Amino acid sequence: MDDILTVAVSKLDLRYSPLRMVSEASIQSMVKSMEKQGQLTPIVVKSDGARFVVIDGFKRQRAAEILNLDTVMVIVVYGEEALMKAHMYLLNRKSGFSIVEEGILIRELVENDGLSQAEAAAILDRHKSWVSRRLEMIRRLSPQVLEDLRLGLIPPGCAQALARLPVSIQADFSAAIQTHTLQAKQVSVLVDLWCKAKEPPSREFLIRFPRKALALACGKDTEERDPRIPAKAYGWFKAVRCLERVAALLRLKSKYEIGAVDDSVYTILSKTLEKAENECWKALTLARQAVSKPAPSVTKKEVSA
């Protein structure tokens, strides 16, 4: 029989939290709900000595911390560890368990808990082929892409498409998705195009200019023009937008891709950066001047007055 208790928030154990992807927006929504109505649903936990391992209710737990609550209501369930992990999925099967979370959970059951794929399928109430597909997908994703998915930097629906790519190129695709705010359907089309392209320049074009590649693939020349921008200023406008996208891409590549290199390489990279910095500074200075409002002209009559 399950027990309903009131326990200290500090006694909640979050060891299973890596199996769930909880967005900041959903947490803030829960905070607002608990502020107005209090905790309506108990957090599902497993007792582990003096601690209570959270099975379901990570948003409620985080909201309780943000609201500085001392205690929360929990319902204690009992069972082996693998069954408790499966319970996480079964409780959220209808309300939203992304394909990435499914893959992460299945890998946990198979690689850490030692279940066969057939056993994992049985406790998740799924077919073995369903388990096999998700396990293969999650194993083909690079650690960086998995982290980007966990942080919500790229849509979960991108996972299946990205898993079709070589691991070595997945980080570049992830950066392009973030820089150009691509949706899952667009990513799927881009991956199809990348797999069909054979020449390196064509593949590089798809990553550097994904929206243009998508437009060309759909029979469109370019993205829709903003009608507020006059024709004579539109080239300037597009150049600034391009610079913005390149800056975002550089930020991501600087964070993840350089690593440890020889001193001679550092010298080359530093000189390249210095040259680019100077050119960008000059360009941005002129761009600022171009959009500065001209000082109002003074007439002769105003001067004599």
Image (cartoon, grey):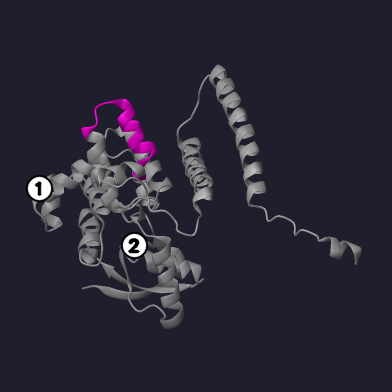
Quadrant assignment for the N terminus: bottom left
Which numbered circle lies on residue 129? 1
Q: Is residue 288 left or right of residue 148?
A: right
Circle 2: residue type? Val
Q: Which residues are magenta?
A: 196-211
Residue 57 percent location from the top left of the image: 34, 66
Residue 151 percent location from the top left of the image: 40, 52
Q: Which residue is mark 2?
A: 54
**Front residue of 22 and 232:** 232
Q: Is residue 114 left or right of residue 24?
A: left
Of the two numbered discs 1 and 2 in the rendering, the one whose residue sits closer to the viewer: 1
Quadrant of the rendered structure where residue 287 is? top right
Q: Callout 1: few (<14), some (14-19), or many (20+) C-alpha neighbours within 10 Å?
A: few
Quadrant of the rendered structure where residue 29 is? bottom left
Q: Main secondary structure of the magenta part?
A: helix
Q: Relative to residue 95, is residue 139 depicted above or below?
A: above
Q: Residue furthest front?
A: 301
Q: Is residue 303 left or right of residue 249?
A: right
Residue 9 percent location from the top left of the image: 44, 68
Secondary structure under badge 1?
A: helix
- Tell me if residue 200 is in the magenta stretch: yes
**Front residue of 260 and 84:** 260
